[in-house]
Image: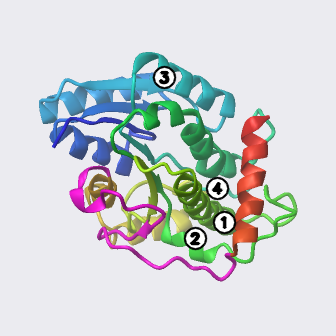
Amino acid sequence: MSKKIILITGTTQGIGKETAIGLAAKGHHIVLHGRNRAKLKDVCDEIKLVTGNNDIDTIVADLSLLEEARRMTDEFKNRYERLDVLINNAGVYPSRERQITAEGLERTMAVNLFAPLLIIQSLKPVLMKSDSARIINVSSAMHKYGGRPDFSDMQFERNYSPLRVYGLSKLYLIWVTRLLSDMLKQRGVENVTVNSLHPGSIATNFGKDTYKSFLFKQIFKTAQSFMDQPAEGAKTSIFLATSPDAEGVTGKYFDKNGRVARVDDRYWSPENGKLVFDYCVKIIMN
């Protein structure tokens, strides 16, 4: 297998870190992303040590801010001539109360949906230079539990709850993935694929701080004991990034076992998908 240049967002812990370790162990050139420079350096040093692969670089950005995401992609394009695999792994679970970024965006949507699309669009020039580029968007089976979308309230000013916001942000990411795949096909682009996945129910600290009560923390701790470990959650991302079986496959949603899975399409239509996509493009172009 030829050596790939792979950018992974959200690599300082959990699934992202394990994905980076797995791909570095295969000998690829990994670009690690994180918000915290010191943590990112520690992870970079650790991955080099445990895998024996020194082709590990870092890039720092807070993806809740689109200006930071733009700066990150500009930095990547200045440093690398091509990109073979982009894994949009970074994500957040909503806080109990609605949070607004310094740019005026609902924080969960900014990180889980707007930033991944901006990164994809900004990195198209270097993705197109790859013989076979793969875009992988980490979604979630929680896309089934966001309820009915309200396209007049895309940032949840009127109807906010953590489960609703998280579920719909991940549903919309699947829709955007599907539409991007269709657009690439329509333009005759055959060397770039885009897919989404559910990594499984993984024992990380993701969502732990949504509620502060002692009871919630005990429930969270108990639930973790029944979950898979982060290395299990990385398997489908690694499969989609490197497997010959994923070559040319696009527009699909995969489960934690690397199999094509069914999306909850109760609210899907090409018209609804376009509403979401156009809204996201308007946000990231501002």
Q: Look at mark 3 in the image and give the residue it sits on.
A: 77
Q: Is residue 57 above or below residue 34?
A: above
- Who is closer to the viewer here, 159 or 71? 71
Q: Nearer the viewer, mark 1 or mark 4?
A: 1
Query: Does the stretch in magenta take in 253?
Result: yes
Q: Which residues are magenta?
A: 241-268
x, y percentage for residue 136?
43, 52
Chief SS of the magenta region: loop
x, y percentage for residue 250?
43, 61
Instruction: Calculate the distance from the C-alpha at mark 3 to the C-alpha at mark 4.
Output: 31 Å
Instruction: Calculate the distance from the C-alpha at mark 1 to the C-alpha at mark 4.
Output: 11 Å
Can residue 273 be seen here? The reply is yes
- Who is closer to the viewer here, 177 or 148? 177
Q: Earlier in the sequence, mark 2 or mark 4?
A: 4
Element type at marker 4? loop
Numbered badge on residue 94 = 4
Residue in the picture at 25% in, 50% down: 242
Look at label 2 and name its amino acid: His
Instruction: Calculate the distance from the C-alpha at mark 2 to the C-alpha at mark 4.
Output: 14 Å
Q: Look at mark 1 in the image and give the residue it sits on.
A: 168
Left or right position of 237 against 10: left
